[in-house]
Amino acid sequence: MTVIRSLNTADKAMQVLQVKIDALANNLANADATGFRQVLTRVSSSGANSPDAGAAPTPGANAGAMPAASRMEMSAALDTRPGPIRETGRDTDFALMGRGFFVVDSESGERYTRNGSFSLDESRQLITPDGLPVMGEGGPLIIEGEQFSLEPDGTIVSGGHVVGRLKIVDFDDPYRLEHQGASLLRAPEDMAAQAVPQPEVTVAQSHLENSNVNPIDTLVAMISAQRAFEVQAKIMTTEDDMLSKAVNNLPRATG
């Protein structure tokens, strides 16, 4: 029946749009989070390619585009475009200029971040805001001495001696990384082994990278998606009423 098909289409559209709205809401909530990478979503037909973060997709793309329910898919990708860099004056604030991610050690294994708002704990170990060790190429970094400097290649020097070099890695498909909280990223199992050193990166000391979320664009995209959701909800209500009337008008069997 056409009505049943319309109900299925509207239901699928609402599910897909809700995922998009949730992603946009999370992006907006983390617009001020240091180093945060927004997630871009795209409503497409089956067989469409995943979003290409390198092609600078628009956050609001396809907010209301609804392919047939049988072919509708939602794809998501981490937007790897850089955020604005700001100067902070803190020696333990680091910003990556270019591709790559800092590596931190967690209970679940290596995690990755663009948030270089680090500090030193009581043992002079370089740690994240959550207390996780920041990894160097030879392991955790212990910075002794009151002053230290950071070379553009990520080498840390204290008291004229090299402490170590920040472990910075990159991936062939960084858009597949998944958020774990606001600032940490994890690699799916099938790409965890793809992490390779990023030798060409430049690290700026006393600087941090802002999120790459544009609050205005994100809000506009979310409003567009919400309106599309409301349209589908009205369609579903209308079709449901039509189905109910059709059922009520069926001839009743007489005994």
Image: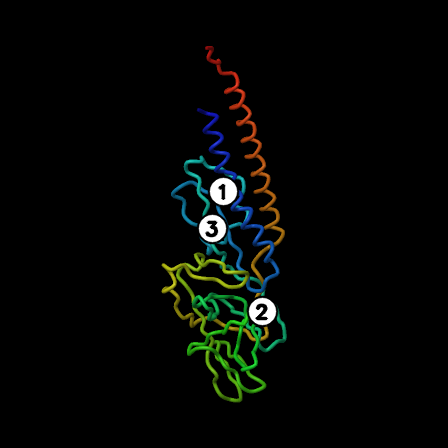
Q: Residue 208, labelled with which disc?
A: 2
Mark 3 element type: strand
Q: Nearer the viewer, residue 110 or 73?
A: 110
Q: In the image, what residue occupies the spot 51% across and 59% down?
A: 81
Q: Position of residue 17 (x, y in %)?
A: 52, 42
Mark 2 element type: strand
Q: Tell which tag, 1 or 3, sits nearer the viewer.
A: 1
Q: Circle 3: is it few (<14), some (14-19), or many (20+) Cα within 10 Å?
A: many
Q: Circle 2: is it few (<14), some (14-19), or many (20+) Cα within 10 Å?
A: many
Q: Position of residue 255 (x, y in %)?
A: 46, 10
Q: Mark 3 points at which residue?
A: 76
Cα separation between marks 2 and 1: 35 Å
Sequence-wise, the earlier of marks 1 and 3 is: 1
Q: Vertical placement of 97 versus 150: above or below?
A: above
Labels 2 & 3 near each other (Cβ < 8 A): no
Sequence-wise, the earlier of marks 2 and 3 is: 3
Q: In the image, what residue occupies the spot 48% across and 43% down?
A: 43
Cα separation between marks 1 and 3: 11 Å
Cα separation between marks 2 and 3: 26 Å
Residue 197 position by quadrant: bottom left
Q: Name the residue under label 1.
A: 16
Q: Which of 155 and 6 is in front in this view?
A: 6
